[in-house]
Amino acid sequence: MRALVMIFVCLVLVCPVQAVEIAGVNIAEEIEVDDTTSLVLNGAGIRSKFFFDIYIAQLYLEKPEKESSSIIKDEGNKRIVMHFLYDGVGQDKIVDGWNDGFAANLDEERLTKLQSQIETFNAMFTEEMKSGDIILFDYLPKEGTRVTIKDEVKGVISGKDFNDALLSIWLGEKPVGSGLKNDLLGK
């Protein structure tokens, strides 16, 4: 029996971990940001609305974490990936979604304080997203939140407070979906 347990342990340690796949999309379990910082997949899930799968959200952190408040407070590098599944998500729908998410998760004072950053952020979304398109939000501690849409860096929104607000759209008290929040937390 002891020999069987040892063989099992060896197989688990030697065999590579299977890649994560969601809706036919391979999800990397580890990534590098700017070829300097390794991040691990904390969790991933599908954002659905009215029975339609809109996008796959992926959360990458320096170290896995199960508590949303700890993730938001963390000062390290983070990445949110939005991999679109649905064809034809217009710029107006995307911006409305951001504004709804910020309003739902920020008190009036924080919303007012971040208003110019939110406006700059919203202005980065100028085109329709189609199936296969990807948006990246990289929190880089010395810079802010870098926004990359369809492989084009659109800009950086300075301040950790903005990134905290952005993460709250998925991980806050009133996330875009409680099931998606749990998926991103790896629960």
Image (cartoon, rainbow, N blue to C red):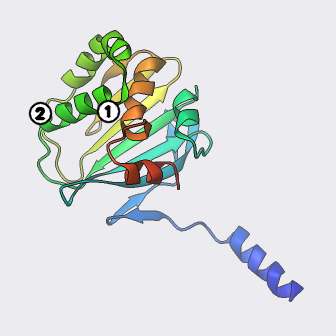
Question: In this rendering, does residue 36 appear at all?
Answer: no
Crowd band around label 1 with a 10 angstrom C-alpha radius: few (<14), some (14–19), many (20+):
some
Using the image as rendered, state which of residue 19 and residue 175 is in the foreground: 175
> Can residue 105 be seen in the rendering of this structure?
yes
In the image shown, does 162 or 130 lie closer to the viewer? 162
At 75% from the left edge and 80% from the top edge, which residue is drawn? 8
Q: Residues within 10 Å of mark 2 (few under 14, many from 20)?
A: some
Describe residue 69's horizontal placement relative to residue 3 as left or right: left
How far across and how far down the image is residue 11, in percent? 71, 76
Q: Which residue is mark 2?
A: 92
Residue 126, above or below 20: above
- How many labels were placed on the picture? 2
Could you tell me which residue is drawn at 81 percent across and 86 percent down?
4
Earlier in the chain: of badge 1 and badge 2, it is 2
The residue lying furthest to the right in this view is: 2
Please tell me which residue is depicted at 34% across the width and 48% down the height of the picture.
177
CA–CA distance in space, label 1 to label 2: 18 Å
Label ID, residue 148 = 1
Q: What quarter of the picture does the N terminus occupy?
A: bottom right
**Label 2: element kind:** helix
| Image location of residue 36, percent across then percent down | 57, 33
Mark identifier at residue 75: none
- In this rendering, the answer to whether 23 lies above or below 116 is below
| Identity, as a three-letter code, of the amino acid under mark 1 | Thr
Q: Position of residue 161 (x, y in %)?
A: 45, 18
Q: Looking at the picture, tell me which residue is in the foreground, 139 or 103.
A: 103
Q: Position of residue 134 (x, y in %)?
A: 29, 44
Residue 97 in which image quadrant: top left
In the displayed structure, 76 sits above or below 88; it is: above
Left or right of residue 52, residue 102 in this image: right
Q: Is residue 142 left or right of residue 57?
A: right
Amino acid at the residue labelled 2: Asp
